[in-house]
Image: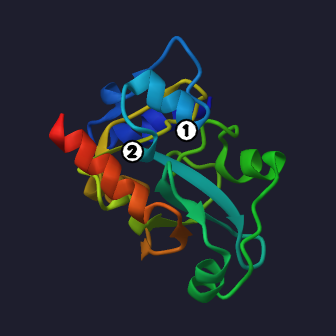
Amino acid sequence: MSLESVKAHLEKYGRDKDILEFDTPSATVDQAAEAIGVIPAKIAKTLSFRGEGEKALLVVAAGDARIDNKKFRHTFGMKARMLSAEEVLDHTGHMVGGVCPFGLAKEMNIFLDASLKRFEMVYPACGSINSAIELTCEELYQYAGAKQWVDVTKDWHGEAREQTAATTEN
């Protein structure tokens, strides 16, 4: 059902046929990177947090980025508290490992993290533990209906430059 809701969502943009489905799991950043054949940083992971009231929020970040609690609190005015697996399924309609900002069960505020901007193409999941799609950051922003770009992560700046340089040189 979850993959189907993502296909229906992406059909509005003529991209439902571009979903990649794998024979092996792509539920973690490393599994997805291996299945696609890219560095883990290019995987656009979707993280689910408690928002204000009953509304949750999603942050889509690069695979090598980690949430910076201080930046998160400064940006959103609250502590970064991730949803439980059951809450993720309830809010997004997607199981952990396939969470993406498309075809959501409930309305959510979606934010894209600056860690993604260093890549021309990124790979978010598509609602199942063995799917993804190749998108530009602009397409990801549009298809997700993102509210804005934020900078709420850490630990990717130095490593990313090295990975990007190594990829460019090959």
Residue 40 in view in this figure: yes
Position of 93 with respect to 142 (left or right) is right
Q: Residue at x 45, y 20 (%)?
A: 21
Camera-side residue of 46 and 165: 165
Q: Position of residue 170 (x, y in %)?
A: 18, 33
Amino acid at circle 2 = Lys
Q: Position of residue 133 (x, y in %)?
A: 38, 35
Q: Is residue 51 above or below residue 33?
A: below
Assign a secondary structure to mark 1: helix
Amino acid at circle 1 = Val
Position of 113 with respect to 117 (left or right) is right
Residue position for label 2: 42
Q: Quadrant of residue 26?
A: top right
Q: Position of residue 163 (x, y in %)?
A: 34, 47
Q: CA distance from mark 2 to mark 1?
A: 9 Å
Q: Quadrant of residue 152?
A: bottom right
Residue position for label 1: 29
